[in-house]
Amino acid sequence: MSSSDVDCGNGGGADSYTSLRIASVFIVLVGSSFGALFPVIAKKTQWLHVPDGVFDFAKYFGSGVIIATSFIHLLSPALDELGSSCLSPAWQQYPYALALAMLSLFSIFIVELVAFRWGTAKLAALGIKHDAHGHGIGAHAAHGPEGISTQSTPLEGNSAYEKDVSDIEASHTHANYDSSALAQIVGVFILEFGVLLHSLLIGLTLAVDPNFKVLFVVIIFHQTFEGLGIGSRLAFMKVPARYNFIPVCAAILYAITTPLGIAVGLGVRNTYNPGSTTASIVSGVMDSLSAGILLYTGMVELLAHEFIFNKDMNNASNGKVAYAVCCMLLGTGVMALLGRWA
């Protein structure tokens, strides 16, 4: 297809169904809010007695949703956008979308590696030996099935000694808890960053896309399921009481991003054309970077830590593991299916 066969101009988008497009801001807000906030509120409050099995299903289902989002809803559109015939031939000579996704994936890895080594050094300065395989104080619980050594020392039974050890262990536990909380917050920030870029772009697209009705229905389900994936992860964050606001704020930020994108798109619909050269480059680059972020998060932070390095999962029955894998595959399948229309 040549650039003359498609609309490569600067504006504007479709202006049909104006009232419904305006209403979509609030309808998508409800769906996104329910998906992201319900797991967090249900986990944090006592009056919503949601069975643990529901949370487990949402957690594994959400992991599948996030992985499918990275491949089907981010990387695939990025390949189309950066391969658009509206772009100069130079864009066709190299798979820039794949390269940018790879760049963001390794960038996140390097950031986490540096943060891990910095945190380990800080723990060492406090006299805490970080053990990545789960042996005692300073260990990362998700990194191995080994237990804590129960070997006794010659001074056990001495009350003064035991009090000193108790005080030291309490201070070490507090320091390690804060370090673990910081690691979780950084991980959530990385996950949110990738998802929010994507959410903003689909909001802009929905506001001006001529195939509004089909896209609108699909995005409602898309945002609800993706919100469930984000919310189930936020609900399982274990942070000190002073950080309890972070999961709620992160869920709210996710909930408002797509409606914000729709509102902005409605405001600029007379000049914004999602098929234009500039829009294709911007959305293609952002989708590529987001795909790399979610690929790393989904495969490493969610799958590897949940199924391979998780002590509870290693000790679980084959039936429980199979159930968790099926929940994950269901989330992947549903989100991949939605990619048929959006």
Image (cartoon, rainbow, N blue to C red):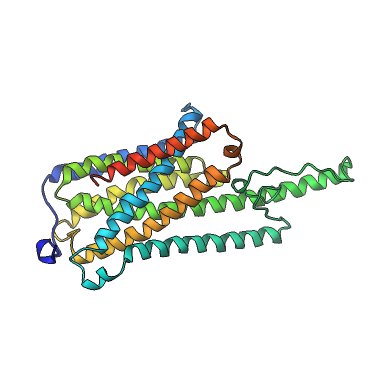
Q: Vertically, is 53 above or below 27?
A: above
Q: Vertically, is 128 above or below 315?
A: below
Residue drawn at (49%, 29%) of the image: 53
Q: How many marks?
A: 0
- Percent coordinates x, y for residue 99 in the rendering: 37, 65
- Percent coordinates x, y for residue 204 in the rendering: 24, 53
- Percent coordinates x, y for residue 342 in the rendering: 25, 47
Please state if 5 lies on the left or on the right of 239 as rendered: left
Please state if 21 lies on the left or on the right of 307 as rendered: left
Residue drawn at (43%, 48%) of the image: 250
Residue drawn at (68%, 53%) of the image: 131
- Percent coordinates x, y for residue 273 in the rendering: 17, 59
- Of 315 and 250, nearer the camera is 315
Please state if 251 lies on the left or on the right of 167 as rendered: left
Residue drawn at (52%, 48%) of the image: 304
Please state if 128 lies on the left or on the right of 330 as rendered: right
Residue 283 quadrant: bottom left
Instruction: Mark yes or no: residue 36 visible.
Output: no
- Of 218 and 16, nearer the camera is 218
